[in-house]
């Protein structure tokens, strides 16, 4: 694991910490490669229930692509894909819920990481911004994910003007699930993880994949697709255990 990314397994949760606080946790090649690899590996680990992405320090969660990376490497494609886009794909493809613990400012490509995550909780001092136009760029890849998260008018304003918004405002338009005082952030994350553990991991994985597919489907196709999804999930071991536990008035025992 590269020094740019710290990885810690805490029982059934993988914690990934962006570790370049001296440059506001900007994404360079080493960090994006390590993130992509770690998340893809977590996806195949049946002993994990979730992945949490956070950052070192309390000033910045992620300031986006490192503008000092040689020859603008973070904006170029490698083997047909962009390294930041690869991280976003890995988050969306992961069969575990990926949670953003946002402990500071989120800018540019950092907004893409947050948008790709399944759940996001922010300290209320955090700010969110798309300042790319100030350096001759545009948040095209980030916008590809933000379009599914926030109203177009707010996205346009942020992208065209480059002005940040508060964590509370980001919560109002759906970029984050909740903004809380810094002292409460860890409790919110732990409570979220505790609730996830109560629920069926296979159903969550299947549901995550289904939501991603339905998001990009024409609305006329979604119901037919969902019929097939619920038929598959409903005939599985978890559903049978869930029904039995309900009838026996006990907590279900989820076994993958």
Image: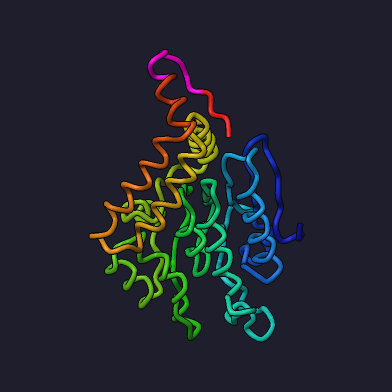
Q: Which residues are magenta?
A: 245-252
Does the segment drawn in magenta span residue 251? yes
Which residue in the rendered view is the most extreme toward the left?
Answer: 220
Q: Is any atom of residue 183 visible in this view?
A: no
The number of callouts visible is 0
> Which residue is at 36% across, 70% downward?
158
Residue shown at 41% from the left, 66% from the top:
164
The x and y percentages for residue 146 are: 39, 65
Observer able to see residue 102: yes
Q: Main secondary structure of the magenta part?
A: loop
Q: x, y percentage for residue 141? A: 47, 73
> Which residue is depicted at the point 67% across and 59% down?
37
Against 154, residue 251 (above or below) is above
On whether residue 21 falls in the magenta region, the answer is no
Q: Relative to 49, say whether 101 is above or below.
A: below
Left or right: 183 in relation to 213: right
Q: Residue at x 62, y 40 (%)?
A: 48
Quarter of the image where the C terminus is located:
top right
Screen quadrant of the N terminus: bottom right
Observer-nearest of 178 and 41: 41
Direction top: furthest residue: 248
Q: 223 or 120, which lies in front?
A: 223
Answer above or below: position of 176 versus 219: above
Which percent across, then down, holds residue 121?
Answer: 46, 47
Between 111 and 44, the one lying in front of the other is: 44
């Amino acid at each position: 694991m590269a020094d740019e990314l710290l990885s810690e397994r805490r029982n059934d949760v993988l914690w990934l910490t962006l570790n370049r606080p001296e440059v506001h946790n900007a994404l360079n090649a080493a960090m994006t490669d390590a993130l992509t690899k770690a998340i893809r590996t977590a996806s195949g680990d049946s002993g994990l229930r979730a992945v949490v992405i956070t950052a070192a320090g309390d000033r910045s969660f992620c300031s986006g692509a490192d503008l000092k990376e040689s020859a603008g490497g973070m904006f170029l494609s490698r083997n047909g894909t962009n390294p930041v886009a690869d991280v976003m794909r890995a988050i969306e493809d992961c069969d575990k819920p990926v949670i953003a613990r946002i402990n500071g400012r989120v800018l540019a490509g950092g907004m893409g990481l947050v948008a790709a995550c399944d759940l996001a909780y922010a300290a209320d001092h955090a700010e969110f911004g798309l300042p790319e136009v100030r350096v001759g760029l545009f948040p095209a890849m980030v916008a590809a994910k933000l379009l599914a998260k926030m109203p177009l008018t707010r996205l346009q304003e942020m992208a065209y003007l480059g002005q940040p918004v508060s964590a509370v405002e980001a919560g109002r338009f759906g970029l984050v699930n909740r903004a809380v005082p810094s002292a409460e952030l860890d409790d919110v994350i732990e409570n979220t993880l505790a609730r996830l553990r109560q629920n069926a991991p296979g159903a969550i994985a299947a549901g995550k994949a289904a939501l991603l597919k339905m998001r990009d489907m024409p609305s006329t196709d979604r119901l037919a697709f969902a019929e097939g999804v619920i038929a598959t999930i409903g005939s599985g071991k978890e559903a049978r255990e869930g029904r039995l536990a309900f009838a026996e008035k006990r907590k279900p025992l989820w076994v993958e």
